[in-house]
Image: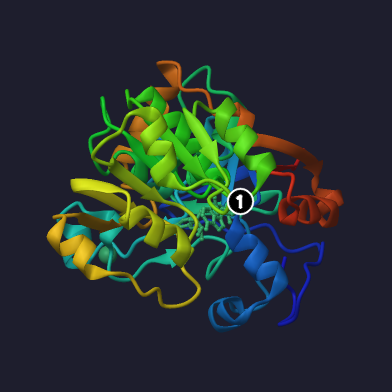
């Protein structure tokens, strides 16, 4: 947990979370480390402005239901579940219209309410996802970021299309497997990190390139893509990547923006206007269509397991965070057994 407003994390004993009548108490089995957790551990300006202390952090997890509130009928002790990390208000216009991923006042599990890097977590029943039989528990532990990948990858039609993914972090890697599964023709992935480029090839990229060494225009020529990419998935948060993407899109193409830039990005808007591009921001996961799609694509053969590169026990949290920060890692799991 983040026990004080300073870099680092502490392993401490805290009271077991209490549940209200609409809540579910979950015993955490495995959790994943996300970039958000690295920001909080490092205590950068965003974390210092956003996260109240003390706070149990973490939001990617799988666990087992151990107790439910009096109003909860659909979850039972022993159920294998994960949690949607955005707790929505339920009362704003979007929530009332069933567009809960667009809620006007979301709170974040492990950011501004207690999270999943703990033996137990309590969540409202509306945030609990019941896993299907046969799901790999390690994959179940990362449904939250897999959901980011799926939400972004399905923002535009990819069947038969040529897709560019900038950024081969855990989410870009999973998106590579998703668009491959969804029937894309060419899937081109760019990232300066050679370890991650190799993983991108394993996940189904047609070509994976370091954008500093290989121009996307050359990749297009080699693949016989005369008019550019039909779909772009921006998953790096880097201005250079977005500009490169804009310069290589087919007219009428769609760009889904997941990457979170740390500063403003200047782009040539002429490319968006004259080429008739659609740029769509993606936040979180659709509740719960994205979760449904994750579950059924896994049942129909989607394989994202190569993204799981490291596993540690919670008592080794410092090593786990060091691995997650390193150049040679994608998704790092923490075991809570
Ligand atoms: P990550 O930081 O592990 O991956 C980003 C990758 O981009 C890295 O591998 C990095 O080497 C690569 N990169 C850097 N410069 C590049 C360039 N010029 N061209 C191509 N690639 C470049 O992050 P992640 O966990 O995979 O998440 C991806 C992005 O999505 C991050 O920006 C993250 O903050 C964001 N995110 C957004 C949401 C949301 O709801 N919108 C949720 C989770 C994460
Ligand atoms: Zn709302």
Q: Depth check: give the residue in front, 270 or 295.
A: 270
Whether residue 290 is situated above or below residue 180 in the rendered picture:
below
Q: Residue shown at 38%/62% (left/top)?
A: 243
Asked if residue 145 shows in the view, the reply is yes
Q: Depth check: give the residue in front, 229 or 8.
A: 229
- Residue 302 on image: x %, y %: 46, 22
- The quarter of the image holding the N terminus is bottom right
- The quarter of the image holding the C terminus is top right
Q: Residue shown at 13%/60% (left/top)?
A: 274
- Residue 318 on image: x %, y %: 84, 57
Q: Depth check: give the residue in front, 159 or 206.
A: 206
Answer left or right for 50 relative to 107: right
Indicate yes or no: mark 1 CB to ligand 1 under 8 Å: yes
* SS label for mark 1: loop
Residue 220, quarter of the rendered image? top left
Residue identifier under label 1: 192
Asked if residue 29 shows in the view, the reply is no
Q: Residue shown at 68%/57% (left/top)?
A: 16
Number of residues whose C-alpha sits closer than 10 Å to that of mark 1, classed few (under 14), some (14–19) or many (20 or more): some
Answer left or right for 111 relative to 43: left
- Residue 74 on image: x %, y %: 38, 35
Answer left or right for 60 relative to 289: right
Q: How many marks?
A: 1
């Amino acid at each position: 947990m983040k026990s004080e407003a300073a870099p680092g994390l502490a392993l401490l004993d805290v009271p077991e979370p209490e549940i209200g009548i609409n809540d579910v108490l979950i015993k955490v089995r495995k959790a994943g480390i996300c970039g958000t957790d690295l920001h909080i551990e490092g205590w950068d300006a965003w974390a210092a402005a956003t996260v109240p202390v003390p706070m149990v952090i973490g939001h990617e997890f799988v666990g087992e239901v151990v107790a439910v509130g009096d109003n909860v009928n659909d979850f039972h002790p022993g159920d294998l579940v994960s949690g949607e990390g955005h707790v929505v208000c339920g009362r704003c216009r979007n929530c009332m219209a069933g567009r809960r991923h667009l809620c006007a006042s979301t709170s974040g599990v492990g950011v501004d309410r207690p999270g999943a890097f703990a033996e137990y977590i309590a969540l409202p029943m509306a945030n609990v996802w019941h896993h299907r039989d046969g799901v790999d528990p390690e994959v179940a532990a990362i449904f939250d970021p897999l959901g980011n990948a799926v939400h972004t990858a399905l923002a535009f039609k990819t069947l038969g299309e040529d897709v560019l993914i900038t950024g081969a972090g855990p989410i870009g890697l999973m998106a590579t497997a998703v668009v491959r599964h969804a029937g894309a023709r060419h899937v081109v992935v760019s990232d300066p990190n050679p370890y991650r480029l190799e993983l991108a090839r394993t996940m189904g990229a047609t070509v994976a390139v370091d954008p500093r060494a290989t121009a996307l225009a050359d990749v297009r020529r080699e693949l016989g893509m005369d008019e550019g990419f039909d779909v772009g998935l921006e998953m790096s948060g880097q201005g250079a990547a977005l500009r490169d993407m804009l310069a290589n899109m087919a007219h009428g193409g769609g760009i889904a923006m997941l990457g979170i830039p740390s500063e403003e990005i200047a782009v040539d808007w002429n490319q968006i206007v004259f080429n008739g591009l659609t740029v769509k921001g993606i936040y979180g996961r659709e509740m719960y269509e994205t979760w449904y799609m994750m579950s059924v694509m896994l049942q129909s053969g989607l394989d994202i397991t190569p993204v799981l590169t490291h596993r540690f026990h919670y008592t080794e949290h410092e090593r786990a965070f060091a691995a997650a920060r390193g150049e040679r890692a994608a998704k790092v799991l923490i075991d809570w057994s």
